[in-house]
Image: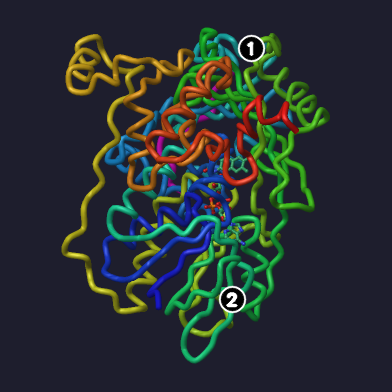
């Protein structure tokens, strides 16, 4: 019997899990995927939105501003990349002035500090490579950047260190209330719990509708991206938005925390909440729109494309708290589309405390505060590199040449509390495979290290879980067939 089961190991579920690690109880996070952060939390813009555009008075606005205010300290405590370069919302047409004025007004109501309307000359002074046809902009100095999957993995580590278990490859199929407890029907059997928290992203609506009297509709809204090589000089220091549309914040050009340039996303309503394909039309659409901000954009700098799926609830706001009309012990954080990443620290704190309080859980006297992740080798000074090598000679072997990731860091990523088990898991924890060659050079060496650390034969090492094995047999065996 669990006290709490959290469904969904995205940034929402892991933020809640981290907070619940401060309490005593038997708790676990369930996810259908083979690793943490496999939904929207691994494929988004990574912007810590300041909160100027969320509709005043909504949960989105309140939790966005609160979460964004917590993000810097949280990232520092976890050792996760964070920056605050600011953002500009660019206006290219006379009618955009009105939209920017409205955004400025909501920034005042939402209490976002420092926003101001600026003219063309100032835009070009701040960002000289922006299209010279720009007319005006909203300057948002508190807009930030975070590495979303690194944040989610670090939150999971902290939760795990404090006793919250992670049951991966557990697909939740149904929720049932029986004799004062919740039965969570999964692909690996039925689990019993006093409380359940639904944070299942695009699938959350299905689980919600099984148990609530107030039905919701969650529409999967896909966003595709181009990622540019970080070897080219960074032409923009701020996140550059265009004026928002009814489908969302529009296409942006933004640096990432690691110095790449990100272009996108699209906003397409689709049927399948797990269909993360990229399409020729979607990518063409990004280029068309990006040219307004950055006319010289070139596909020669593209190193990969990817997409993520927003969980858009038709009511337009986050739905957070006890599930309406359900028996006691059912909680949720659903419809967590953008700015869900920015709001995650606040959602985790508020909902985690709410559920713990409602169950009467005591504080965990042995709670371990997070240990910040070590500085990456690529960011170390020569002196720091020498010291790291003297302490652990595996720092002397570079495995990923593009991103300068060492063998020591790969081994550490596998040994973390909720450590990597796959090539993609290593990639998102260390950046090995994230660079220009997209793992063409380092994948075999990373596979060997995974095999050694996990005590598994090479043909059981996968890219991203069962069904993605990289070695299918030996050539000799194949010839014998
Ligand atoms: C294109 C795009 C751009 C965005 N840009 C930003 C941004 O710049 N800033 C910002 O603040 N926000 C942004 N967001 C929003 C942000 O990414 C999300 O709000 C946030 O990641 C949601 O986290 P989550 O944990 O709720 O959902 P997810 O990360 O999707 O996690 C849900 C988890 O539930 C699991 N799951 C689903 N069904 C089941 C099941 N049946 N059983 C078990 N597990 C299940 C999934 O595998 C997944 O791991 C963006 C989103 C997208 C898609």
Name the mark nearer the viewer: 1 or 2: 2
Q: Quadrant of the N terminus?
A: bottom left
Q: Could you say which is closer to the camera, residue 271 or residue 221?
A: 271
Neighbour class for label 1 at 10 Å: few (<14), some, many (≥20)?
some
Specify start and end residues of the magenta stretch as a single range. 110-119
What percent of the width, then of the height, locates residue 22? 27, 61
In the image, residue 444 lies in the stretch drawn in magenta: no
Q: Does residue 142 appear in the picture of this structure? A: no
Q: Is residue 431 above or below residue 297?
A: below
Q: Is residue 158 above or below residue 405?
A: below
* Spatial CA span between label 1 and label 2: 47 Å
Dot 1: element: helix
- From the image, tell me which residue sits under label 1: 301
- From the image, tell me which residue sits under label 2: 175
Q: Which quadrant of the view contains residue 229?
A: top right
Q: Which quadrant of the view contains residue 232?
A: top right
Q: Is residue 216 above or below residue 41?
A: below
Dot 2: element: strand
Q: Quadrant of the C terminus?
A: top right
- Is the residue under label 2 in contact with that under label 1 (CB below 8 Å)? no
């Amino acid at each position: 019997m669990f006290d709490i089961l959290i469904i969904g190991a995205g940034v929402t579920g892991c933020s809640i899990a981290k907070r619940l690690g401060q309490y005593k109880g038997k708790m676990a996070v369930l996810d259908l995927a083979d690793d943490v952060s496999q939904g929207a939390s691994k494929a988004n813009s990574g912007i810590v939105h300041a909160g100027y555009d969320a509709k005043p008075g909504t949960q989105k606005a309140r939790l966005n501003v609160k979460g964004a205010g917590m993000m810097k300290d949280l990232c520092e405590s976890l050792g996760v990349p964070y920056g605050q370069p600011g953002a500009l919302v660019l206006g290219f047409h006379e009618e955009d002035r009105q939209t920017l004025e409205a955004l400025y007004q909501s920034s005042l109501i939402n209490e976002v500090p420092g926003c101001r309307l600026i003219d063309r000359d100032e835009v070009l002074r701040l960002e000289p490579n922006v299209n010279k046809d720009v007319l005006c902009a909203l300057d948002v100095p508190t807009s930030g950047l975070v590495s979303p999957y690194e944040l989610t993995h670090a939150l999971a580590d902290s939760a795990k260190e404090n006793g919250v278990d992670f049951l991966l490859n557990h697909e939740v199929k149904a929720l049932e209330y029986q004799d004062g407890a919740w039965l969570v029907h999964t692909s690996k059997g039925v689990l019993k719990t006093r409380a359940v928290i639904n944070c299942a992203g695009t699938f959350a609506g299905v689980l919600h509708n099984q148990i609530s009297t107030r039905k919701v509709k969650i529409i999967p809204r896909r966003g595709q991206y181009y990622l540019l090589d970080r070897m080219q000089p960074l032409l923009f220091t701020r996140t550059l938005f265009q004026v928002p549309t009814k489908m969302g914040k529009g296409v942006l050009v933004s640096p990432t925390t690691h110095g790449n340039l990100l272009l996108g996303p699209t906003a397409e309503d689709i049927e399948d909440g797990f269909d993360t394909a990229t399409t020729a039309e979607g990518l063409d659409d990004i280029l068309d729109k990006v040219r307004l901000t950055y006319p010289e954009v070139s596909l020669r700098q593209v190193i990969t494309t990817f997409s993520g799926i927003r969980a858009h609830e038709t009511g337009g706001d986050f739905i957070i708290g006890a599930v309406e009309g359900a028996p006691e012990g059912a909680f949720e954080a659903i419809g967590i589309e953008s700015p869900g990443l920015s709001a995650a620290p606040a959602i985790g704190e508020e909902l985690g405390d709410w559920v713990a309080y409602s169950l009467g859980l005591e504080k965990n006297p042995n709670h371990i505060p997070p240990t910040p992740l070590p500085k990456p080798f690529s960011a170390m000074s020569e002196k720091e590199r020498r010291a790291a090598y003297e302490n652990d000679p595996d720092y002397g072997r570079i495995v990923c040449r593009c991103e300068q990731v060492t063998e020591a860091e790969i081994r550490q990523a596998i040994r973390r509390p909720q450590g990597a088990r796959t090539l993609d898991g290593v990639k998102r924890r260390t950046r090995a495979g994230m660079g220009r060659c997209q793992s063409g050079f380092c994948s075999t060496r990373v596979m060997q290290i995974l095999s050694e650390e996990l005590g598994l034969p090479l043909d059981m090492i996968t890219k991203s879980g069962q069904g993605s094995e990289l070695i299918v047999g030996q050539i000799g065996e194949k010839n014998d067939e």
